[in-house]
Amino acid sequence: MDESKPKGRAKGGVARARALTPEQRKAIAEKAAKSRWGVSTVPTAEHVGAVKLGELALQCAVLPDGRRVLSQRGLAEALGRRYGGNDFRNDDEADDGGGKLPFYMAAKSLKPFVDNDLAVVVNSIIPYHHGKGGGIAQGVDASALPKICDVWLKAREAGVLTRPQAEVARRAELLVRGLAHVGIVALVDEATGYQEVRARDALQAYLERFIRKELAAWVKVFPDEFFRELYRLKRWPWSGSSRRPGVVGHYINDLVYSRLGPGVLEQLQEKNPIMENGRRRNRHTQWLSDDLGHPALSQHMFALIRFMRAESSWDEFRVRFYRAFPQRGDNLELDL
């Protein structure tokens, strides 16, 4: 007797599902989605694929409105987590009033490292059809991935993880290393084939979102750690002063703005030119948008500082970082 075949009511359910037309199955799925997530329609991802980062793979999709999402189940599997275990239950007992977290982040030891903004993003599940005629998948905004990994890495640095959880942190580190080589948005586009069909003016639209048309209030986005690591690699004495050599501006343009995306530095220099006194009227960061520019800058700085920490000399850092974040038209430098 084959124990794997459905029996009883389950067998009847399978037979009923096979008898339904694709339109009927979709209607049933839409009704279930409205009940579960409060949405009336579920978008169909026409571009789907898998992002491969080392030994890990992440199921991903691009939705009709351009949102890039990662499959929540695929993300959990990449981290090596499956539903189950006392510290990963996402039930009423795990909700202490601060809101529930996905089971791959619900360990009590992680809570001190999860800020409110990240909690809102990972709890904002994005349902979508996984291709035409496919079932409904639960997605999470792809841009949240570096912050999710950072939570695990911070918990590991604090020494609060169990041995099984330490393996999750190791996988998170692999993901971060992979993301240090390419941006998640570009990687999703490549994996799904979206880059082949996106509009010819998509890059310009990206830049318009990236760079503000009106100035935003200046906030400190270059942490002191960036400058400390820069001084260390250049063998400069560190005093903590805000007065820095003029060449630091050149390094910021080279290491940061020119590598955020094609054309970003050029448009910043056009919108924020050098005046007759040799200074700029505003800081470049004031022209970056809140929804795209600043998050992209923060993600880039996170990767940049990790590269700086890992090297003992400016030349070693420069070779490895330039290889991971080449400018368009760069010739890659090889270790010989």
Image (spheres, helix red, strand yellow):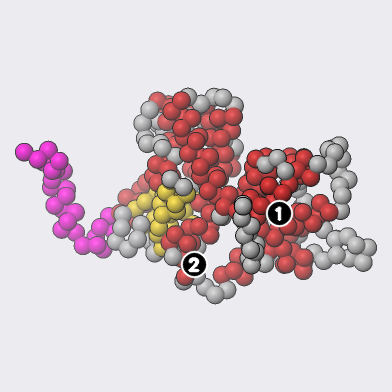
Distance from the alpha carbon under mark 1 to that under mark 2: 25 Å
9 in the magenta segment: yes
The residue labelled by disc 1 is: 255
* Image: magenta residue range: 1-28
Residue 118 visible, this orientation: no
The residue labelled by disc 2 is: 195
Q: Position of residue 225 (x, y in %)?
A: 73, 39
Q: Is residue 313 above or below residue 106?
A: below
- Viewer-closest of 333 and 94: 333
Q: Position of residue 292 (x, y in %)?
A: 62, 56
Image-quadrant location for residue 102: top left
Q: Secondary structure at mark 2?
A: helix
Residue at 57 percent of width and 73 percent of height: 201
Residue at 60 percent of width and 65 percent of height: 206
Q: Position of residue 202 (x, y in %)?
A: 56, 70
99 in the magenta segment: no
Residue at 15 percent of width and 58 percent of height: 19
